[in-house]
Amino acid sequence: MDTRAERLAAIVLRTVAYGDSDVIAHLLVRGRGRVSAFARGARSSRRRFGGALEPFQLVEVLLAERSGQELWILREAAVAEAYAGVREDLHRIAHAGYAAELAHELSRPAEPADELFALVTEFLHRLATGPATSARLRALELRALAAAGLSPELSACARCGSAVPWGKAAFDAGAGGLACGRCAHPGALLLTAGARAALAQLQRVGLSAADTPLSADGSGRPADPRAFEEACAQAARPLAAFLLHHLGRTPRSAGFAQQVGAPP
Ligand SMILES: [Zn+2]
């Protein structure tokens, strides 16, 4: 028996068809965190669900928690923001899928994650109104990691704490970030000076810096957008290694993004 139902804002992370007409929806819910919910008749009832249970949409849901049960009951859902632009090309679909998977992996069942919720809605909004970029992906990764308390160390050596001179540097995912010349393992991944500066800016500022980056020289002038994007693409592998270290596996959606040739 479910008790009280509440109207809440949620992002649809993914859905799984169940039986002939039901759906299990995996949601990131404002104020509640990650919730899996059973939507009876979701594939047959236009009145209660009307196309709302599509991935990467912001929806208003009527949700009932069941005490002691992981699967909640989803009574109704309505689209609040479809982010239609996200579905206009495969690169954007791939990036949205990656964002949804990252949000799923970096949240816990029924543990509020409002910083992550705000991040993913901002990411989808920006993705719906512009092309898929590596810069936004790096900002998403860094801020999602920060929201989960897992920020990589980008200013000093993650092993010994000593300063890492400006310029290219080793990145040790297992140690938690940059590694100084003494601590770096042979064969460690490298961050170019540009990639390092780009990540530091994105970690500090967030998604807005991905769309309007500033020059790394401290002048306050805009950065060259193409050079910034290239630096962010170069930082994909080190951050992927960092995520793999914490998640224990490579996100499935990263493979799809690669297949369709989306920016890494
Ligand atoms: Zn060190």
Image (cartoon, rainbow, N blue to C red):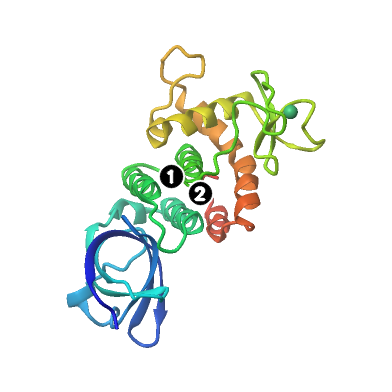
Q: Residue at x 33, y 49 (%)?
A: 121
- In the rendered image of this protein, does residue 229 appear above or below residue 244? above
Task: Decide: few, some or many residues near mark 2? Use Cα within 10 Å; few <14, some 14-19, many ≥20.
Answer: some
Question: Which quarter is ligand 1 in?
Answer: top right
Q: Which residue is mark 1?
A: 132
Q: Single out the residue that lies furthest toward the top.
A: 219
Q: Single out the residue that lies furthest toward the bottom.
A: 20
Q: Quadrant of the N terminus?
A: bottom left
Q: Residue at x 40, y 37 (%)?
A: 207
Q: Single out the residue that lies furthest toward the front.
A: 67
Q: Where does residue 104 sit, x and y in percent of width and height?
A: 47, 59
Q: Considering the numbered disc 1 on the image, is that residue within a helix, a strand or a loop? A: loop
Q: Earlier in the sequence, mark 1 or mark 2?
A: 1
- In which quadrant of the rendered view does residue 249 lie? bottom right
Question: Label 1 sits on what residue type?
Answer: Ala
Q: Where does residue 101 sit, x and y in percent of width and height?
A: 48, 58
Q: Which residue is mark 2?
A: 262
- In which quadrant of the rendered view does residue 170 lie? top right
Task: Decide: few, some or many residues near mark 1? Use Cα within 10 Å; few <14, some 14-19, many ≥20.
Answer: many
- In the rendered image of this protein, does residue 242 appear above or below residue 223? below
Quick one: 160 or 210, which is closer to the camera? 160
The span from disc 1 to disc 2 (Cα, nearest Å) is: 7 Å
Q: Are marks 1 and 2 in contact (CB under 8 Å)?
A: yes
Q: Where does residue 215 sit, x and y in percent of width and height?
A: 47, 19
Quick one: 84 or 175, which is closer to the camera? 175
Q: Residue at x 50, y 54 (%)?
A: 106
- In which quadrant of the rendered view does residue 100 lie? bottom left
The answer to whether residue 142 is seen in the rendering is yes
Residue 9 is tagged as none
